[in-house]
Image: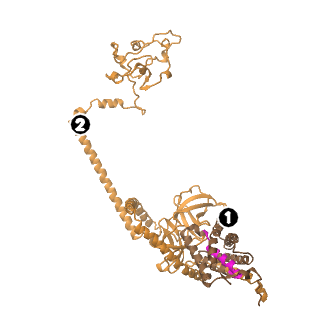
Amino acid sequence: MESFFTRFKNVLVLVAVLLAQTIGLAIQVRRPVVKGEPDGVKVTLLRTSVVAVVTPFEKFFHGIGYNVRYGWSNYIDLRDTRQQNRNLKDEIARLRLEQAQMAEDALEGQRLQTLLDFQRNYVTSTVAAQVIGSSGTDQSRVVYIDKGAANGLKVDQAVITPDGIVGKIRETYPHTSQVLLINDQGSGAGVLLEKTRIRAIVRGSQGGRIVITNLTPDNRIKPGEKVLTSGGDQVYPRGLNVGVIESIEPDLEHQPYTLIQVKPTTNLFQLEEVLVITGTQGTLPAVARKDLAQGAATAKEIAKARAADDAEEAEAEAKAQSAAQIVAEKLPSLQDEKTPDDASKTTPESPAGVVPRPLPTLHPDRFTPGTTPPASSLTPGAEHSVMTYPPQQTQHPATKAEPQPESNDSSPDSGDAAPVKRPAPIKKALPQTPRQDQNQVQGQTVPAQTRPAVPKSAAPEPETPSNTQGPDR
Amino acid sequence: MPSLSYTSRRELEEHSFSPAVTLLVPVAAILVQVLLAKLYWRLAMLDLPLIVTIFFSVSRRSPAVGTVTGAAIGLIQDALTGRPVGVNGMAKSVIGYIAASIGIKVDVDSLLTRILMNFGFSLLNSLILFLINRRMLGTPGAHPAYAQELLRAVANTVVSIPIFLLLDTTKRVA
């Protein structure tokens, strides 16, 4: 027997060690969950001993790094401090405006919640802590903070940053606490999707991500939707940021559920300072109430200032109008008597606006608008006739103008019988060559080769006397 | 004159360490591991306690001592995590035992042997942890991440070479 133990000493030691640890694991796993006591007495004793040995070194090295880093940034590297101060002041002003805009709604929501007897927890007190260490392995995502039971921290209290939730306290020691991060495999939180108001549970995954695995496919859920705490887990107060939906895909192992990956709003891999929520209450805290009241007062002030501005503007406009009227009365020459009539004439009846009339032609020819008779007046097989042109509207310096009948003043293509006054100095205003006149149609120059060449022989017989008055070319 | 004879490699090259080294080196390895992981989260991929376990096991060349050394280092490592105590303890117990057994038969002072040994034990550690998580603890969503574990093995191997050279200076011939 003695030789057996001597011979198999190594194997027996291995088996004994493995067996003892296996039994220990089984006891830990099978142990009923007790609120506030995540581990048994013996395991807690082991953890406390190890933490007590390791933590002083962690604090020491963290203190060195902290002092070097913040000593540099607080006392030496102050180059952009003034600019940062200005930016922060601007931001405060902007946030005050935002707060004022939201204060009324918040107060109304408060009143409605009170009417409905709606239960809600508000954060009343927090303890700021610094992260001093980690578990040292990527298979367990926990961090250690420099505040413990002596600072009023308890197991299952929520740990947050201004960006969102971080995790919860798993275990407390006198001056240190272990925080279980939300992306640990054993972690979870009740959440609410912001837009769709769907409730779900986020869990940590093996790779350090947070996922939702208890939802079936839903077309309303889209990537980019914010995920907030629902408050249903009794750990995290309602409405805190958790993350943003990153991707949605079918969970192949758990059909028909979907695997929704959530990108946390807090950088869980680079935590420096956190807040531990140590107190909540059903009513709004006094500080928040004061802020809301201040916001509401600011909103009223802004509304008053806007109303005063509007009144001043209206008064100034009225004054300006009256001054203009006085000036207009004192200076009657500025008033154009024809203006109202002209305005009424030029007011378009159709939404397309006024069709511009063609400028009077200096040298009418066969291409002048209105010279071509309508197709209905043409006779097939008619004899070639001499092309005639409309009368010259303005006097050419080289030719003497003959007296024109009154009816020729109307534009040939306008179709409007109303007389239109021609501007007298049009010749001076449009010193165009004859070739340019040929190509001008309603103010637009068209290349000569694109226009249809109408031979004189093909020109129809003139029907109106106006076409017989023009000079032949 | 008594004749001096060596019956095995173990008797030829068995080393011992001072109690201070035996106690402080594993604690220092765990402490540095914790600080490195806090400094940059990707450094949590390293497993300095595993490297120390392998070194002490192959140097002492006693499987029983290797088992106990691995168990102790693993349990301390577990105590700092949020997981049940014993996961790393079991994995490192097995590795300590195997490393010491190999150390009896193979020249573990050569560079190539050390590289192969650390690479292989790192993969074995990942495999044992995966099996414990999947089979014994029933952790949901535990999948083998082959690429990551290979990368972890390479990183541990690279880091282990200078650490072994450093720890070689603490050896005492038994």
Between A125 and A175, the one lying in front of the other is A175
Kindly indicate which chain is depicted in orange in the rendered structure. Answer: A
| Image depth: mark 1 or mark 2 in front | 1
Q: Secondary structure at mark 1?
A: helix
Residue type marked 1: Tyr
User: Quick one: quadrant of the N terminus of chain A?
Assistant: bottom right
Is the residue marked by circle 1 packed among few (<14), some (14-19), or many (20+) residues within 10 Å?
Answer: few
Residue A301's label in the rendered image is none
Q: Nearer the viewer, residue A436 or B83?
A: A436
Left or right side of B92 for A446: left
Q: Is residue B98 magenta?
A: no
Q: Residue furthest top?
A: A383
Q: Name the quadrant of the C terminus of chain A.
A: top left
Question: Would you say residue A135 is visible in this rendering?
Answer: no
Residue B40 seen in this snapshot = yes
Residue identified by numbered label 1: B146
Give the residue number, with chain letter if any, for mark 2: A328
* Magenta span of residues: B45-67
Q: Position of residue A295 (x, y in %)?
A: 37, 62
Give the quarter of the image for residue B62.
bottom right
Chain that bears disc 1? B
Task: Residue type at mark 2: give it.
Answer: Ala
Residue B168 placement (x, y as % from top left): 64, 77
Q: Classify 10 Å Cα crowding around label 2: few (below 14), some (14-19), many (20 and above).
A: few
Query: Between marks 1 and 2, how big is the CA–CA gap?
Result: 90 Å
> Looking at the image, which residue sits at the far left?
A330
Colour option used: by chain
Instruction: Find chain B in the image and tell me its colour.
Output: brown
